Image (tube, rainbow, N blue to C red):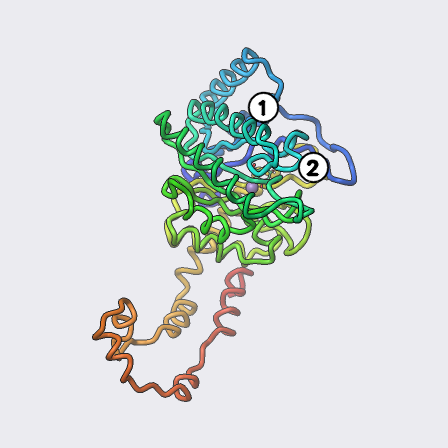
Amino acid sequence: MAKKLQWKRSDKFAFGLWTVMNRGRDPFGPETRPPLSGIEAIRGLGERDVYGFEYHDNDLWPMDATPAKKRSIINEAKRAMKAAGILCTAATTNLFSHPVFKDGAFTSHDPRVRAYAVQKVMANIDVAAELGAEVYIYWGGREGAEVDIGKDPIEAMKRFRDAINFLCEYVMANGYKMVFSLEPKPNEPRSNIYLATAGHALAFIATLDHPEMVGVNPEYAHVKMAGLSPLHEYAQALEAGKLVDIHLNAQEPLRFDQDMSFAADNPKEALLVVKLLTDYGYAGTKAFDCHPYRTEAAPWDFVERNMRAYKLLEAKVEEVNADTRLCAMLEELTVADEGGWNQVLAAYTPKNADKLKVAKFNPEKLAQRTLLYEQIDLRLTELLLGAR
Ligand code: GLT
Ligand code: MN
């Protein structure tokens, strides 16, 4: 394998422990792979030069673990991390598997369930801080509804907000160095999940007591399930300074949650995402959140292919950015600003408004400008397919 294409820890790749622990169960059939413990998952990822892992509390210890059992698992995880040279980059809480959360956690009608959910998160935030995680994710899988008349969506937002506000204060009160991250998803397992897209999440964050403590980690496949553009979601979050983590994978649009490996469906779209992250110097971890195909006997080919795909696309981005033909055509899209309009549009002033009011434009003439998008797209396709 070309050296450049071999991933290194410095690439900051991460995997959710649950991705390699996934055993291939789906709604139509049982597990096809043997179990893997959280500790074995940490070791296996570390052995493959993965930079970090993300975990749910119950990926590591069962919900009914005694305090002593939980402590011994956490200690073992710390030893495994040290031995394998892998970091814990993000943590999250399982607020979706147990039937207690069947109608939501933070948005449950039952205040006891909401309190239990917040308590479960607080307990894991303590562990996350001990393991060194600096990002804490909320994927509200059960926060949604099938019967909307039975669940006021405005009330649900208020409950969600109260929970996040409470937990922000908890992190501050403990002096933890940790930011929160909301992970949007439009549906599955609920018919409709609240905070369905990055846009919903960003708008919600602005209503929190500590918006500076909360960002988003859009998942590529979740965006595609909503029929939207992962590139645009990542870009909007990045531009807002809110992209604190990313979940990479692949997904045919508007289907059930397929959770395929990164770039498995649409390499051009994946390329543009890697280009965005590269060009704008995204510095967070790049976490893969997908599952090995059900036909795999072990998760390790899956782990390697995700990182390899990212490195291939990264090398391709370098080629694309250096391609003189493509660069020349992209350059042609820009227009010399002879009228000084960029400066006028950059800020409202009475003077700028006056200048604009009296300006003469010829829309017919402006519309005659041709744009080389067919040729540009073809060139990108040539580069992607390795044609000369
Ligand atoms: C679950 C979901 C993911 C979330 C995880 C975080 S769990 O597997 O499908 O997208 O990132 O809770
Ligand atoms: Mn995810």
Can residue 129 be seen here?
yes
Q: Residue furthest left?
A: 351
Ligand 2 sits in quadrant: top right
Q: Secondary structure at mark 1?
A: helix
Q: Is residue 309 above or below residue 54?
A: below
Asked if the beta carbon under badge 1 is closer than 8 A to the nearest atom of ligand 1, the reply is no
* Number of other residues with Cα within 10 Å of mark 1, as a class: few under 14, some 14 to 19, many 20 or more: some
Q: Which mark is residue 334?
A: none
Residue 309: horizontal and vertical position, in percent? 54, 47
Asked if the beta carbon under badge 2 is closer than 8 A to the nearest atom of ligand 1, the reply is no
Classify residue 64 as left or right of residue 202: right
Classify residue 94 as left or right of residue 208: right
Q: Residue furthest right?
A: 28
Q: Secondary structure at mark 2?
A: loop
Real-space Cα distance between discs 1 and 2? 17 Å
Residue under circle 2?
296
Residue under circle 1?
40
Sequence-earlier tag: 1 or 2: 1
Can residue 44 be seen here?
no
Classify residue 195 as left or right of residue 148: left
Residue 122: horizontal and vertical position, in percent? 48, 26
Q: Is residue 252 above or below residue 290?
A: below
- Three-letter code for the amino acid on which mark 2 is drawn: Glu
Residue 351: horizontal and vertical position, in percent? 21, 75
Name which residue lies at 59% across and 32% down: 95
* Number of other residues with Cα within 10 Å of mark 2, as a class: few under 14, some 14 to 19, many 20 or more: some
Residue 215: horizontal and vertical position, in percent? 43, 44
- Three-letter code for the amino acid on which mark 1 is drawn: Glu
Q: How many callouts does the rendering have? A: 2
Name which residue lies at 61% across and 23% down: 37
Give whichever of 12, 3 is nearer the camera.
12
